[in-house]
Image (tube, rainbow, N blue to C red):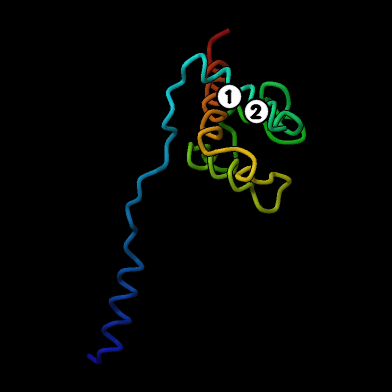
Amino acid sequence: MHTIARCTLLFATMMAIPLATAAITNPLSPTPELIAEGKKLFNRTGCIACHGHNARGAVGPDLTDDEWLRTPSDEMVFNTIRNGRQGTAMSGFSDNITDQQIWTIITWIRDENRKRKLPQ
């Protein structure tokens, strides 16, 4: 087999093997203080304008349920807040808030989701 053919075959084989990557998860613990700070950040950064009071949806979708187009993993939510979502009105906030603040908002959103699932 020619060298070029072997390299091409090797490259094709390597591309077919899925690489195991660790999912990004929220590094923060949901303390009452952190959750309260997350709600303040949500309101202060303007998220409330599209996602409504308590993130239950308005112009933008409800962030407290699990009925999203994609599984709402921590990584997906983090990347959406940080970088925005192309083709939607959701712009990224990486120029306005830190990664730590994004995780704080996610902590609050997750707490709202948890409270929503509690029996009434």
- The Cα atoms of the two marked residues, 2 and 1, are separated by 6 Å
Q: Which residue is mark 2?
A: 42
What percent of the width, then of the height, locates residue 102?
55, 35
**Quadrant location of the N terminus in the rendered image:** bottom left
Residue 31 against residue 17 in the figure, above or below: above
Secondary structure beneath dot 1 equals helix
- What crowding class fits label 2: few (fewer than 14 Cα within 10 Å), some (14-19), or many (20 or more)? many
Q: Which residue is mark 1?
A: 38
Residue 63 against residue 117 in the figure, above or below: below
Q: Examine the image and state in which quarter residue 10 appears.
A: bottom left
Q: Is residue 5 left or right of residue 80?
A: left
81, 44: nearer the viewer:
44
What percent of the width, then of the height, locates residue 88?
71, 48
Residue furthest to the left in view is: 1
For the point 68% across and 32% down, the residue is 45
Amino acid carrying label 1: it is: Gly
**Quadrant location of the C terminus in the rendered image:** top right
For the point 41% across and 32% down, the residue is 27
Asked if the residues shown at circle 2 and circle 1 are in contact, with their CB atoms under 8 angstroms apart, the answer is yes
- What crowding class fits label 1: few (fewer than 14 Cα within 10 Å), some (14-19), or many (20 or more)? many
Amino acid carrying label 2: it is: Phe
Q: Is residue 68 left or right of residue 26?
A: right
Q: Examine the image and state in which quarter residue 63 appears.
A: top right
What percent of the width, then of the height, locates residue 44?
69, 28
What percent of the width, then of the height, locates residue 5?
29, 87
Residue 20 against residue 76 in the figure, above or below: below
Q: Is residue 6 left or right of residue 18?
A: left
Secondary structure beneath dot 2 equals helix
Residue 46 against residue 111 in the figure, above or below: below
Q: Examine the image and state in which quarter residue 37 appears.
A: top right
Q: How many marks?
A: 2
